[in-house]
Image (cartoon, rainbow, N blue to C red):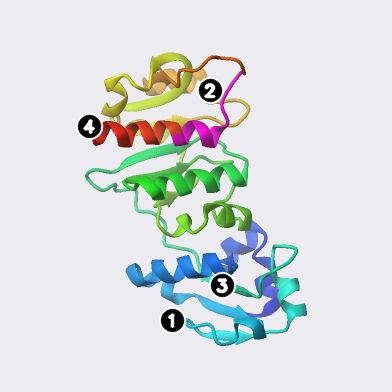
Amino acid sequence: MKLDDIRKLHQKKYRQALGHFLVEGEHLVLELEKAAARNPHWKKAELFVTSAYEHWPGPWPRHLISDRQMAHLADTKSPQGILAVVPLPPAANGVPEEIEKAVYLNEVQDPGNLGTILRTLAWFGGFRCLLSPGSVDPYNPKVVRASMGAIFHVPVETDVSLDTLASRYPRIACLDIGGDAITNPDFQAHDCYLFGNEARGVPSEALTQLSAQRFTIPGAAAVESLNLASAVNMAVYELNRGQTR
């Protein structure tokens, strides 16, 4: 791929058109290498390095470029000197594993939130992430960095409409103020867990149509709401804790 095309991968429309995304920095490239050992798709990447990383080991073709060229390609202000151009994974097929649960994020906007959520899902395992239309692109460089490599390990579906969930998941839960506590045993008995936009949540009419059971994270209510990533982290931890009791 030409260097000018690689620079374009900072934008979603070009990631989609060219079918690739950027993985930048030593840690993420190492995580990509670990993922490639288990999934041959990730072996199709290409590495671009400055002289500091000229002898970097790994399964991919390497291209030596100047520090100036790296600064032009990288998304960070002070690039380390190593990045990979990675083909987008094939679309998740929508068929969950037998023990897999789904986390649905409605119009999540913050790249840091999505990256953190993916890290949590990868840590516990057994989850797929569904993103509604209008959500931040999971292959946005900021999301990829915030995920710390989790993007390689969590099945992600994009542009999943709320109104399609009922046909896929018979038991749907949502996090909402005023519901039962997530410590209630009923919280474990669902297939899909909905979380709303950072500012607006999930539309009430949609929850009614989906017959979603409402749950809440008990707290002192000194502030209006929890950060989205924090709410997902607590809910997923509780789901994992319930499975190990």
Looking at the rendered structure, the kind of residue marked 4 is Arg
Residue 185 is one of the magenta-drawn residues: no
Category of crowding for the residue at label 3, using alpha-carbon neighbours closer than 10 angstroms: few (below 14), some (14–19), many (at least 20): some
Give the residue at mark 3.
85
Category of crowding for the residue at label 4, using alpha-carbon neighbours closer than 10 angstroms: few (below 14), some (14–19), many (at least 20): few
Give the residue at mark 2.
203
Kindly indicate whether the residue at mark 3 contacts the one at mark 1 (C-beta within 8 angstroms): no
Give the residue at mark 1.
59
Q: Position of residue 38 (x, y in %)?
A: 33, 68
Give the residue at mark 4.
245
Upstream in sequence: badge 1 or badge 3 = 1
- Secondary element at tag 2: loop
What span is in magenta?
224-233
Let me know if residue 51 appears in the view: yes
Kindly indicate whether the residue at mark 2 contacts the one at mark 3 (C-beta within 8 angstroms): no
Q: Nearer the viewer, mark 2 or mark 1?
A: 1
Q: Position of residue 139 (x, y in %)?
A: 56, 57
Q: Residue furthest top?
A: 178
Task: From this view, report whether residue 213 is shown above or below residue 101.
Answer: above
The image quarter containing residue 74 is bottom right
Residue nearest the observer in this picture, 184 or 222: 222
